[in-house]
Amino acid sequence: MQSSKFKILITGGAGFIGSNSCEYFLDKGHNVVCLDNFSTGHRYNIENLLHNENFTLIEGDIRNYSDCQKALVGVDYVLHQAALGSVPRSISDPITTNDVNVSGFLNMLSASKEANVKRFIYAASSSTYGDSESLPKVEDIIGKPLSPYAITKYVNELYADIFSKTYGIETIGLRYFNVFGRKQDPKGAYAAVIPKFVQQFMNYESPVINGDGNYSRDFTYIDNVIQMNELAMFTQNPEAINTVFNTAFGDRTTLNDLIKKLQFELAQFDSKIADVKIIYGPNRAGDIPHSLASIDKAKRLLDYNPKFSMKDGLKESVKWYWGNLK
């Protein structure tokens, strides 16, 4: 896509999406700076990168403005992945979620403007669609947010828009839809559903589905997300700047279908997993019943062409988890 080499700052670079992105852009020959405070990211995610002469780790916090400035020295592009994810976490601790996701975001955006970066690409969220019932989700039709987390991610979009219009900094927001894949952490109270289920199956524990399992999601494999970040970074299409894009595969899967596929793939490695029972619990507060992205805008303006379906991504993920969690 690009023959030139650039200096790219990836905030939250030791997290799931961030560490995969660090690896990808280093492989492409770019200089990569990782800024992380290791509150949810892990050193082991970037351990293999520490001896790469093109990789710089800065241990710092986006809530500290001087850390943002330090990380931005000589940077061409920012991929802002740092955030406190999880709807339930935001419900139990809205203050910290807001500090990181709004104040931290504003710090990074403002420092990026000062540093005259070429472009600021940031992780937005499908949670911004809130109570809008229309399917598929189209970028310019949103509802009211259903959680503090969703509010923070929508505020990011508003700030990015104002900064682009007021200060001329180029921004692109990527509304991620249920991203999954290698390096996604199965541990902790707020673990994402796929790695959590994988870990439980591998331990012969019954996974618990919230609700009747008919809620559906547009599960999006990590490599599709990296593709979108790269396209957003280097696009020369003026129509694609200062806007937001759904970042998804454009297909939806119910939780019941997901867990059956997961169980089937894992049973190829260990037949006993096929006998693990699945349990159903109450619906979770703040959850959107159905999520499905229209990716027409990304196809039209960015030439986005996601390579991995949910099924293909699940196969790759299970292979990775089997090799790394066992």
Image (spheres, grey):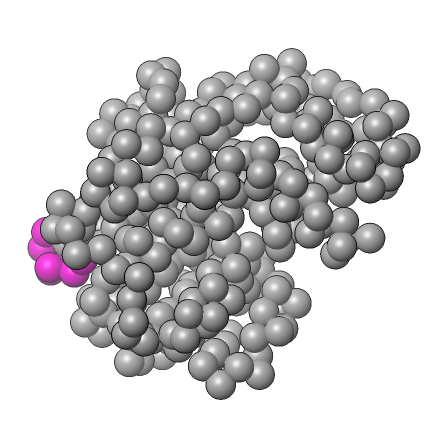
Residue sitting at x 63%, y 73%: 47
Say above or below: 114 vs 83: below
Q: 67 or 196, which lies in front?
A: 196
Q: Name the image quarter holding residue 113.
A: bottom left
Is 166 covered by the magenta stretch?
A: yes
Residue sitting at x 33%, y 33%: 295
Residue sitting at x 77%, y 21%: 279
Say above or below: 282 vs 326: above
Is 142 covered by the magenta stretch?
A: no
Q: Which quadrant, please, contains the N terminus?
A: bottom left
Q: Is residue 177 left or right of residue 156?
A: right
- Residue 158 visible? The answer is no
Residue sitting at x 31%, y 80%: 73
Q: Is residue 313 left or right of residue 299?
A: right
- Residue 7 visible? The answer is yes
Q: 262 or 89, which lies in front?
A: 262
Q: Name the image quarter holding residue 254.
A: top right
What's drawn in magenta, residue-wise?
165-170
